[in-house]
Image (tube, helix red, strand yellow):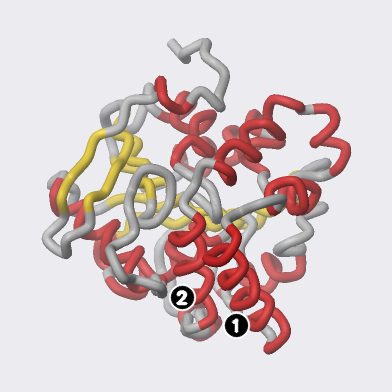
Amino acid sequence: MAHQVPLWQHDLIMLQRIHLPNGIDLAYQDAGSGPAIFLVHGHPLDHTMWQPQVEFLAPKYRVIVPELRGYGTTPLPPGKSVTLLDDFAEDILALADHLHIERFVIVGLSLGGQIVLETYRQAPERIRAVALADTFASLDTPEQKQARLDTADRFDGEGFGDFAAETLHKMITPANAEGLPAVAAHIIRMINESNPHGAAAALRGRTARRDYIPLLGQITVPSLIIVGRYDAFTPVPLSEEMHRGIPGSKLEIIEESGHMTNLERPDEFNSILGSFLDSLP
């Protein structure tokens, strides 16, 4: 049975910890049993963003939700000012090794979607299927890259400050920010309680990421792409670009949603993801 506590009371969600061989003290949620599914959160959020999906999936699947290094309760390594997508993917694969999970489905939103692509690049033989939500595969423009670097410097120098309030209407639509106050509060809490230095390191790492467009044509596993109709961070054309690039992929556009499709429209998101998972061989 799904728990009845508000989603933002993340301290009530049980986390486990593992000291990985690479030195990362990684926190993660491990729920349910069955075929393994990894859910990879976005920036600058934490594992609790996936709680509606954990509750939906755990009756049929083993759901693993890592808290990425530098986010939530997983610390950033001392002296580390840049976290590459390669680092995040290596952490996920090391966690899978620790849990003795050889093959798994991997789902990611935003930054998490780019980590999904990098994880597939590193270990395609271990991936059963991918789901890419509200993300993109191409490189940043020079202006986008500079904006990430400027924001990273701001986080290091000032913390998050008013960032959560400033960015809320890009994370979710203004209508959903008003109509779904618990979701808005959850997003603001995740941002404000995260580690600004971890978020800064990840922003710098994203500016150094490889172009994943060439990788798309090499993805041979079942692939689902989900995007909100009004996603301000990763507009629909970027998902359409991935859909064209990944052979046989399925594209689903969720209406009346912005960037956080899994929280703004959890029932629709779950239905789409659940149907995709049920179709896997």
Judging from the image, what secondary structure is the residue with disc 2 in? helix
Quarter residue 18 falls in: top left
The answer to whether residue 212 is above or below residue 199 is: below
> Which residue is labeled 2 in the image?
205
Name the residue rendered at 42%, 44% in the picture.
72
Judging from the image, what secondary structure is the residue with disc 1 in? loop
Name the residue rendered at 22%, 51% in the picture.
25
| Front residue of this view, candidates 57 and 218 | 57
Q: Residues within 10 Å of mark 1 (few under 14, many from 20)?
A: some
| Front residue of this view, candidates 271 and 52 | 52
> Which residue is labeled 1 in the image?
139
78 relative to 44 in the view: left or right: left
Name the residue rendered at 76%, 27% in the picture.
181
- Name the spot of residue 204 as percent of width and height, x first: 50, 76
Residue type marked 1: Leu
Q: Residues within 10 Å of mark 2 (few under 14, many from 20)?
A: some
